[in-house]
Image (tube, rainbow, N blue to C red):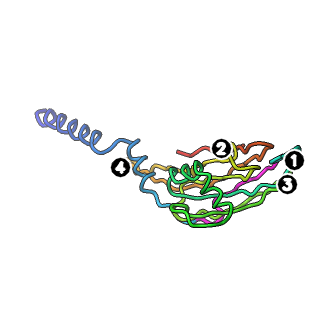
Amino acid sequence: MITRLLWQPILICIFLVGCSSGVNSEEQMKMAINNMTMPFSSGAISLHIIPSAKMNAWNDIANSSVMLILQANEKGILENVMNNPIIIKQMFDGAGSFDGILKIDRYVAMPGQNTTLHIDRSENTRYVCIISGYYPFPAKQHMLLIDIPIAITKQGWWHKKWNAVLSPLEMKILLGQEAIQKVHEPTESK
């Protein structure tokens, strides 16, 4: 009886220490995201481009539009590009190098002609920016900033470990008469 009374407090202390030690689950998820590898992946970005018949219209005449698809590791780099018309002009001209931009793809969209682009995701890419060259010059309604989706999984029973990996990005983009917009973006799995 005495040994039973002694073991109960010891076991309770062990369980309390075991439950309270370490970081909580949300912090572990954030750590997994921050420490995830971002490898090159062939065709991991699929953009379904849906141009309207009146895309980029000027005087009621539809026009083609060059699209820039930019990849970067940091959101701030792409936000700076989106806010700087001089850099945007240089990118459309194909001139210069740009710090932090990992890859630039160009595509010419034609009014009413749907297509799907399968783009390789560069190593360390976490964000994608799409800028469509509407007349006379791209404005905010002609740009999209997109996070690459993350798949987060939990393993283990006693010692849970969170793993985060980049998922393929699949999105429909509508190129309208005066603006572009995301039509569909899958949700992140957690």
Name the front one of labels 1 and 2. Answer: 2
| Percent x, y of residue 19 | 29, 40
Q: Measuring 71% from the left and 50% from the top, which residue is drawn there?
A: 137
- Callout 1: helix, strand or loop? loop
Identify which residue, 101 or 123, lies in the foreground.
Answer: 101
| Percent x, y of residue 17 | 23, 40
Question: Mark 2 sits on what residue?
Answer: 140
Amino acid residing under circle 3: Gln
Which segment is the magenta one?
41-53
Question: Mark 4 sits on what residue?
Answer: 159
Q: Within the magenta stretch, is there residue 71? A: no
In primary-sequence order, the first of circles 1 and 3 is 1
Amino acid residing under circle 4: His
Question: Mark 1 sits on what residue?
Answer: 53
Q: Measuring 73% from the left and 45% from the top, which residue is drawn there?
A: 180
Q: Within the magenta stretch, is there residue 52? A: yes
Identify which residue, 91 or 40, lies in the foreground.
Answer: 91
Horizontal side, residue 107 vs residue 22: left or right: right
Label 1, residues with CA under 10 Å away: few <14, some 14-19, many ≥20: some
Name the front one of labels 1 and 4. Answer: 1
State which quarter of the image contains the N terminus.
top left
